[in-house]
Image (spheres, rainbow, N blue to C red):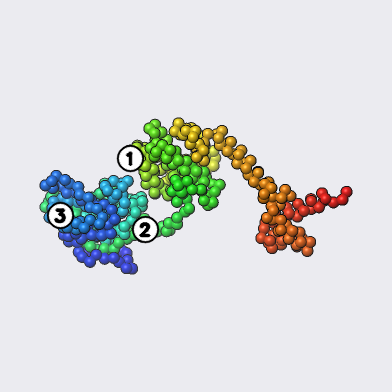
Amino acid sequence: MSAKLKQSPEPRQFSFDLEHSAEHHYKALHTKQTHTAIVWQARRDDGQQWTKLEANDKTILDFIKSLEYGRDTYLTVNEFYGWRLVRLLRSLRAVYVDIDGQTDLGYVLDELKDAGIPAPGAVIYSGNGLHLYWLLEPTTGKALPVWQKITDKIIDALAHVGADPKAKDCTRVLRLCGTVNSKNGKRVKGLVLDGYYWTLHELADEVLGFREPYKPKIRDIQPARAKAKKKAPTSISGSIYERWYKVLGDLYTIANYHNNNIPDGHRDAWLFLTATALSWFTRSYTLRDEIISAAKTYTTLNDDEIEKVVKTTLNKAEASANGSLVDFNGLMVDPRYKFKRSTLYTWLSDIIPDSLLPDLRAILPDELAEERHRENARKNWQDKYSKNEYTGEGVKRTNKPKQEQALEMRGLGKSTREIASLLGVNQSSVVRWLKTHQKDHQANAPK
């Protein structure tokens, strides 16, 4: 039986029926393998149950074929950086649903159709139910939140027919075609419906509703720039993004000073502030990956400790992404954390030696920040009135010829607006040049 709610204009079909073929099952998921897939076997003579299948290993297919008729053998649907952990997820290969005790595929497809959800591309008869597969073009693990929403929606739609609400983790292993379910002695087999490979965005449109294609924003690339100590781009100059950009850069500078290992007793504070800074640049659904990467690189916190430290930051980032605002002194503002400079420095001052202060731009004691402000103001004043640039007459040396042209045009009766347009300058500059000339003329007139 087959059912298709959506036809690909150029469908990528399997050229085979899965039936009892472990090889074809493996190829359906991992033909374009780039990282680690993993097999679990309940019974092996050597006592080893887990086998890693690394990309480009030419012996994989022979090994997979040898698994047929074996009992209780499972395969990871997705691929990982070495081991099946969420934080090591590398590539999503399918959305899947495990239906217990239900083998009437026609009934399940009708229920999907009624729910407005497209039919799966392939089905595995597990010996005790059905595994439905919506096959994906290889998709980055950073898209896990979208994958999870799709999975949740399909499981909810099929809950009344036995969809297992616990079988929705990306690290799950599912029974391999051609092997035997020891509970009843049935051999696992598969059936191809349309074999179409979705992009995750396409499938999300079908299951969750249409979304506009994501348009990257300049702030999405700022964490890497800040880490590299590059100057903030003009696109965020003068904004709250520039401020947190500088904070993020300082946090990495502090970490580097400590040889990429934040001292005990200060790891929570450093990670919390780093997560807060990242939340101003990184899309909410990739923020967790950014935070975990920073935590694993610069601290020794374990997964539970990381989750505890950044839980509220993640919640606020999600709320911001959803357009939520919070009341702050009568104003509705972005829910993400904001901290005063003095608070940032107080939290981290014990791991910031005086010798490091010249390298920091935002996490500073108040007295140093005020001193820098005064120094910058003094330099700006000197630059503005430098004899190398200004004539001392209210006109830059480089603009002196334009002032003379403006005077000539004014003598011909042209307006200041016309003059500004012809010279390609602001009207206010023309007015100032004319006034400066008039004052000089009056000052030099005979008395």
Where disc 2 sits, the SS reads helix
Q: Which amino acid does label 1 sit on?
A: Asp
Where disc 1 sits, the SS reads helix
Residue farthest along the right direction in this orientation: 447
Whole-angstrom CA distance, mark 2 to mark 3, is 34 Å
Neighbour tally class for label 3: few under 14, some 14-19, many 20 plus, Cα within 10 Å: many
Residue placed under numbered mark 2 in the picture = 201
Query: In the image, is residue 420 above or below residue 447?
Result: below
How many marks can you see? 3
Tell me if 276 is positioned left or right of 154 in this view. right
> Where does the image place residue 95, in percent across and percent down from the top left?
29, 55
Residue placed under numbered mark 1 in the picture = 303
Whole-angstrom CA distance, mark 3 to mark 1, is 34 Å
Query: In the image, is residue 371 above or below residue 106?
Result: above
> Where does the image place residue 269, in percent across and percent down from the top left?
42, 35
Quarter of image, res 25? bottom left
Q: Looking at the image, do the residues carrying marks 3 and 1 touch, with CB atoms under 8 Å apart?
A: no
> Where does the image place residue 191, in percent across and percent down from the top left?
20, 61
Residue placed under numbered mark 3 in the picture = 67
For image coordinates 19% across by 47% down, the residue present is: 50
Neighbour tally class for label 1: few under 14, some 14-19, many 20 plus, Cα within 10 Å: few
For image coordinates 52% across by 41% down, the residue present is: 361
Q: Which is more toward the observer, 181 or 347?
A: 347
Residue farthest along the bottom direction in this orientation: 9
